[in-house]
Image (cartoon, grey):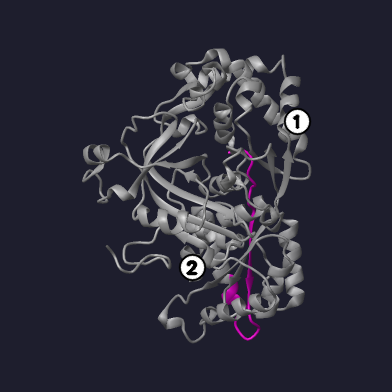
Amino acid sequence: MENMPEVKLGIVAVSRDCFPMSLSISRRKAVVAEYTKTYGEIFECETTVENEVDMRKALAEVNAAGCNALVVFLGNFGPESSEILLVKEFQGPSMVVAAAEEAGDRLCDDRGDAYCGMLNASYNLYLRNLKAYIPEYPVGTADEIADMINDFKTIARVKIALSDLKIIGFGPRPQDFLACNAPIKQLYNLGIEIEENSELDLFEAFNKHAGDERIPGVVADMAEELGAGNKKPEVLEKLAQYELTLLDWIEAHKGSRSYVVIAGKCWPAFQTQFGFVPCYVNSRLAKRGIPVSCEVDIYGALSEYIGQLVSDDAVTLLDINNSVPRDMFESDIKGKFDYDYTIKDVFMGFHCGNTCTTKLSSHEMKYQKIMARTLPVEVTNGTLEGDLIPGHATVYRIQSTSDAKLRAYVAEGEILPVATRSFGGIGIFAIPEMGRFYRHVLVEKNYPHHAAIAFHHCGRLLFEAFKFIGVELDEIEYNRPAGDRYPSENPFKA
């Protein structure tokens, strides 16, 4: 996908001077061999760090190789100060991981004690106010370390991307959508830049694109993508004009940043002035790696982008919208799936039409039914409708509170292969213990109605990424299993 950084990994082995350096070197080589065989390229630094002079030499090597993410590998106990100075001076995300002992008959001459050294490394990080990624269980054999490094590559991609990201917004949040408002201070704390523009600025740029010679090519591409679902061909030219407007705006306004996402406005005046709704264009940009949130939801756009970085796939933003009627639950869901879902475990996720074609079971480009209740139908054309593809799903969001505290939630479940019988881009979601999660996280913690959706189970890496970028542990919530009580949950059940 576009709009994401390439992570170039480097690995540096460290060695305490009273342990055999050869042990760290041989273990490093084994890790590199396993990683290369399974996952691909990683730069192997030839310098093994025993002291600060070695540290500077190794740092020069990984920088010269163009590495932007670093694995500090404790092949033995390791020199705690020099190895952590390497983390401090490397200008990118770092991981610290340690070698497990290989065999019982080698515990005299080839015992590395990296299990112990990891404790000193973590304490030294704390003393220096540094953050490195430390896996759930950071000690392993070569193949296990290779798997940990692959996880780190994803987490590092999030960190690298956010430090080079700009969020471009258009217009204030609509009236009665106060939930999409949040302080922007935490965006700056994450290293993100933000550019907020007037809708008039966007409208002016759109009008200047009238007659753009590229429009016919975009219209043809849209028609090919939509196929038989092209139910509103008369609006494609305006949609193509709008798509080119956004893409040109990104190029002209990204400034010093490499990556951009958009928080867009879509009502109440957008339809009457532009003459369409932007949902289908938003879906096309999301498909190519540029998420566009609805209703100027800045943290929604950020959430989408993080999920894209973690899943390496298109994502969407949906309203946690409506309950599933009991008759539908009884006829289409109850007792039909591996997990014994209750009616409180299921809900419908919906938005007007911003989900890309590849994430819909079938699709039609139509008008927006809710807006058409108060506006002429012809100015509400441009939504992409259809039921979401069934399969794994992760529902998640990162958000700032009104007093500028960063928090997040992650819940894994599935999109059911059940017809929604409704309109818009919509699907029936099933998440174990959703009813409790809805009340004691989404409601209790004052989250807005917008949720980012990844079409994979990626809760584990999202959780790690949220920790690594700075969300406090007690501010990351998840759907707790039965018997694991939320702090606000009444212990006396009805």
Residue 118 vs residue 328: left or right?
A: right
In the image, residue 455 sits, relative to residue 273, either above or below, namely below
Between 479 and 367, which is closer to the camera in this rendering?
Answer: 367
Q: Can residue 311 be seen in this view?
A: yes
Residue 351 vs residue 3: left or right?
A: left
**SS category of the residue bearing label 2:** loop
Q: How crowded is mark 2: few (under 14 residues within 10 Å), some or many (20 or more)?
A: few
**SS category of the residue bearing label 1:** helix
Q: In which quarter of the image is the C terminus?
A: bottom left
The amino acid at mark 2 is: Glu
Residue at x 69%, y 40% (from the top left corner): 168
Query: What label sits on residue 4 in the rendered view?
Result: none
Residue at x 47%, y 69% (from the top left corner): 141
Q: Which residues are the magenta region? A: 1-25
In the image, residue 379 sits, relative to residue 166, either above or below, namely above
In the image, residue 332 sits, relative to residue 459, either above or below, namely above
Residue denoted by label 2: 136
Residue denoted by label 1: 201
Residue at x 43%, y 68% (from the top left corner): 487
For the image, the number of numbered tags is: 2
Q: Does the magenta stretch include residue 178?
A: no
The amino acid at mark 1 is: Asp
Give the image location of residue 347, x and y in percent. Answer: 37, 44
Q: Hey, which quadrant is residue 282 in on the image?
A: top right
Earlier in the chain: of badge 2 and badge 1, it is: 2
